[in-house]
Image (tube, coloured by chain):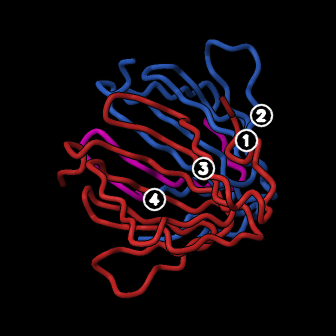
Chain colours: A red, B blue
Amino acid sequence: MIDNLFAQLPRSTVENGKNPEQFADLLQRPGLRIERIVSTGQCSPPDFWYDQAEGEWVAVLCGEAKLRFADETEPRHLRAGDFVDIAPHRRHRVDWTPPETVTVWLAVFYSASLATR
Amino acid sequence: MIDNLFAQLPRSTVENGKNPEQFADLLQRPGLRIERIVSTGQCSPPDFWYDQAEGEWVAVLCGEAKLRFADETEPRHLRAGDFVDIAPHRRHRVDWTPPETVTVWLAVFYSASLATR
């Protein structure tokens, strides 16, 4: 269990980019989960879309990424500090993360019952 | 409303340190609130303790701070990336933030009903 968001980061290499992204749960409560995601060049498989029952508030802490929503024509280019709230079942995918950089995401997943405004 | 965690940061000056910390809600849902807190030298008033009904998962994104729990003898020195989960009603205070640096906190407040393990 890490206690620092930037601890135990992998090196970003072409080899590493062939491995899966790294996921670490930082907090788990009923209806709430905080997760660190580390990307080193990975992206979602072709034609794959996340379709999550939970809401997800996600920030890029370092690095960058292109996040695509099925209901938008262009991906959003997220840079360090950018965040976005993804409503439950809003389909999205990661089009790109840079292979030469470590990208650290902080994601807060919350149950759809909390997503009601 | 900011859309980047590091947007619109104040300059850290002795003058600014006399002002209150800056708070910005990034997400609000029933039982869940994500907040950015910006400190520029502020600390909790003498003998003041936070005693919150909610749980609070909090990370220092940049800068540093000394966070003190009433049930611990020494403050914890948090640096960039460090995070801690504060249980509801666990009394705590901010002993110190550096006046020469901008400290950005990301806090996830969650209702005590979610805090049940």
Q: First in sequence, mark 3 or 4: give its number.
A: 4
Q: Are marks 1 and 3 in contact (CB under 8 Å)?
A: yes
Mark 1, chain letter?
B
Name which residue lies at 39% across and 28% down. Answer: A29
Q: Which residues are magenta?
A: B24-45
Asked if residue B25 lies in the magenta stretch, the reply is yes
Is residue B8 visible in this depiction of the protein? no
As displayed, is residue A81 above or below residue B32?
below
Q: Residue furthest bottom?
A: A73
Q: CA distance from mark 2 to mark 1?
A: 6 Å
Residue type (three-letter) at the residue carrying disc 3: Trp
Packing grade of label 4 (10 A; few <14, some 14-19, many >=20) is some
Q: Residue beneath label 1, please? A: B65
Helix, strand or loop under label 3: strand
Name which residue lies at 41% across and 71% down. Answer: B1
As displayed, is residue A45 above or below residue B69?
below
The disc placed on residue B77 is 2
Residue type (three-letter) at the residue carrying disc 1: Ala
Q: CA distance from mark 3 to mark 4?
A: 11 Å
The disc placed on residue B105 is 3
